[in-house]
Amino acid sequence: MVMMSVLFSATMSTNELMRVAADHHHKRILLDESDRKALIDLLKQRGQQELEYGQELEVDNVRLLRRVTGAVGVYFS
């Protein structure tokens, strides 16, 4: 397991950001709490910008979902 700080940036694609989230979820990398929160916030922002209402994107075990109400969530399975 690798402990990394700021393993991602806003210039990365949404798929790349979701891969980082999946790696953290599977404990392949370890993000500190502030980096984890920043990653989730960035994914939610991307969901607002890139997804249509009711659309979702899935990478590995991470789902980025924009509900028909407009709410965006990041879910792990």
Image (cartoon, rainbow, N blue to C red):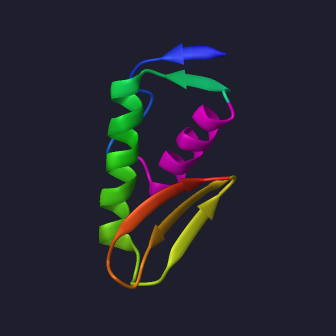
- Which residue is painted at 40% across and 82% down in the image? 52
At a point 32% along the width and 78% down the height, the residue shown is 70
Nearer the observer, 23 or 8: 23
Q: As drawn, is 29 to the left or to the right of 26?
A: left
Residue 32 percent across, percent down from the top left:
43, 21
**Which image quarter: residue 73?**
bottom left
Q: Quadrant of residue 24?
A: top right
Residue visible at 68% across and 53% down in the picture:
77
Residue 34: percent from the left, percent from the top?
A: 33, 27
Q: Is residue 18 left or right of residue 61?
A: left
Q: Position of residue 68 (x, y in %)?
A: 39, 85
The correct choice, above or below, for 76 with respect to 64 in the image is above
Quadrant of the rendering where the N terminus is positioned: top right
**Is residue 14 in the magenta section?**
yes
**Start and end of the magenta stretch?**
11-26
Residue 42 coordinates in the image, percent (x, y): 33, 49
- Compared to 72, does 37 lie above or below? above
